[in-house]
Amino acid sequence: MTPSARLAARPARIASPPALVALTGAALAGLTAAMPASAGQGTWRLNDTGLTQCVVFDPEVGYVFTPACAGTGHDGEFGRDVARPGHGDGHAGFSFEKIGPAGETLPRTAPVWSCVRDRVTGAMWEVKTSDGGPRDAARRFLNLGDGQAGDASAYVAEANASALCGASDWRLPTRRELESLMDFSVREGGPLIDHRWFPHTPAALHWSATPAEVHGGSPAYRWAVNFYSGGTLWYGGQYGEFAVRLVRDGAVLPKRRWQANGAELRDKSTGLVWRRCAEGQAWTGSTCAGSPTTFLTIRDAVAHAQGQAASSGQGWRVPNIKELASLAESRVQRPAIDTAAFPGFVTESYHSATHWTENAVFNWRIQFADGSMARDHWGGKLLLVRDGE
């Protein structure tokens, strides 16, 4: 049965999903959270966002983009795109290498390649084609995991049987892995990826293997990443035909992710240091008390972060969207975060320093009710981050 036929045999996607279900996350052992990695989950070393322009406020015209990022406190002032801007192997801190059909490393100038290795995360990705073959970018899949023709799981088996790039351990990527490829500097419809390394990428939703704990934890729901407009949402695997990009390799997550130091947490997978409490809350020694502050605009949030950096002598800042998304926990809801690591966490939309390229008023957020990524322009809470030593 074709994907379309199987789709027609299913009911339409639920128009009004029931209330999100509160689930219990993994507990901390002492002061560190045990975070077992699922098979093939890979590294959480973070790619930058690709965004190199920042936003300033002009009283006469409002918010405007500028390439002069120093002192703005926005995404483009920090990260790999500043420290390691690239040498022809990827845009703004991304770093890739081309892989041939037998798994061999190719020169950057190679006109044809079958896969791409991400030198930051360690993951290897398939490259799409436009030749009508198995890897054609026009193919779409359901995501039920039943192995039937037209399902993403059948495509995984197909790629492994063909020993794509000399390997037989291809799989669907996790949500985090898919998000790592997104280039937020690309305008909507781009698609949001470096097309020089990933040609023929459809500007479309792409399935991940990460389950979404909605509708009572139904296994039929998975996260999907939108390479047309950005954002990450959950969908029923039987209710949509989306694009698929397979992955393999990647380092293994540390079994104990968090290293606590009072009111701060060091993420051993990324090296980032987070405040355990949202701004406006106070650390009591065991939890976060009080109500978090609502910052009406990203301008307000950045000004607060800069004040905290100045008064503490530490580099506190508003996280970029990939850093903030790394906290979203797919196994729990309301809040979609490990509450053993972040006790007293309040379910809300949280600011990132990454702006939407279409309109400088909007910035990307994580809604910690379910962990979804979307853009907004008014009101949000704030978790501060700084680079580790």
Image (tube, rainbow, N blue to C red):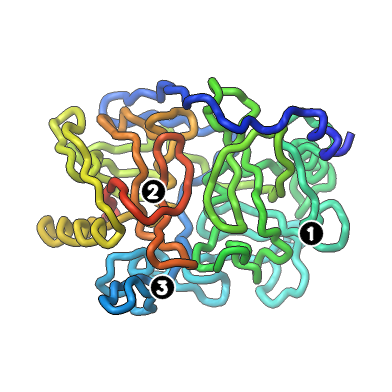
Disc 1 is placed on an element classified as loop
Q: Quadrant of residue 111?
A: bottom right
Q: Which residue is mark 3?
A: 53
Q: Quadrant of residue 291?
A: top left
Q: Which residue is mark 1?
A: 101
Disc 2 is placed on an element classified as helix
State the image coordinates of residue 371 (x, y, percent, origin top left). Answer: 45, 39
State the image coordinates of residue 180 (x, y, percent, origin top left). Answer: 53, 54
Q: Is 241 on the left or on the right of 60, as rendered? A: right
Q: Earlier in the sequence, mark 2 or mark 1?
A: 1
Q: Is 161 on the left or on the right of 42, as rendered? A: right
Q: Which residue is mark 2?
A: 324
Disc 3 is placed on an element classified as loop
The quarter of the image holding the N terminus is top right
Q: Earlier in the sequence, mark 2 or mark 3?
A: 3
Q: Quadrant of residue 342?
A: top left
User: Residue type at mark 1?
Assistant: Pro
Q: Residue sitting at 39 percent across and 48 percent down?
A: 324
Depth check, front residue: 170 or 72: 72
Depth check, front residue: 115 or 216: 216
User: Residue type at mark 3?
Assistant: Gln
Q: Earlier in the sequence, mark 3 or mark 1?
A: 3
Counting other residues with Cα less than 10 Å from the Cα at mark 2, is it few (<14), some (14-19), or many (20 or more)?
Answer: many
User: Residue type at mark 2?
Assistant: Leu
